[in-house]
Amino acid sequence: MGYIKHNAIVVTGAPHAMSQLEMVHNKAQELFGSLVSPIIESHWNGFHSFFVAPDGSKEGWKESDDADLHRRKLAAFIDSMKHGDGSASIHYVDVSYDEEHDVEIEKTNKYSKAI
């Protein structure tokens, strides 16, 4: 018996950053294969998003460890696209949820301005 913690990633690109979003989408497909959704256009304001589905493996399994590494690689790839002031045109959130109904934001590149 094992413990399952699902991790899903949502990635959204600003209207002017479609070429960057396509690069991130390609990287996600390289890392996660068929778990990556197509890029979807929002109904308003020109934003585009895609989703990386959970791998479904149990914590401690090689597959789960591999997926953890892939999520870190994707996050680092997106973070490398930040602007000089720390803001970004591509935003993401890696959220985990488990069979005990715990939910946590594992990582995000949310921008917060210094006051």
Image (cartoon, rainbow, N blue to C red):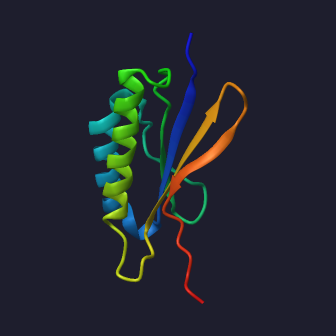
**Residue found 40% across the figure and 70% down from its top:** 16
Q: Quadrant of residue 67?
A: top left
Up-down: is 9 above or below 32? Answer: below
Q: Position of residue 42 (x, y in %)?
A: 56, 54
Report whether 44 appears left or right of 84: right
Q: Residue furthest bottom?
A: 115
Q: Nearer the viewer, residue 88 or 101?
A: 101
Q: Nearer the viewer, residue 90 or 47?
A: 90
Report whether 76 appears left or right of 92: left
Up-down: is 79 above or below 11? Answer: below
Q: Position of residue 2 (x, y in %)?
A: 55, 15
Q: Position of residue 88 (x, y in %)?
A: 43, 70
Q: Residue furthest top?
A: 1
**Residue found 32% across the figure and 48% down from its top:** 73
Up-down: is 20 above or below 57? Answer: below
**Residue found 56% across the figure and 31% down from its top:** 6
Q: Position of residue 81 (x, y in %)?
A: 32, 66
In the rendered image, the quadrant that contains the N terminus is: top right
Q: Quadrant of residue 31?
A: top left
Report whether 55 appears left or right of 5: left
Up-down: is 86 above or below 94? Answer: below
Q: Quadrant of residue 61?
A: top left
In the rendered image, the quadrant that contains the C terminus is: bottom right
**Residue found 55% across the figure and 82% down from its top:** 113
Report whether 57 appears left or right of 23: right
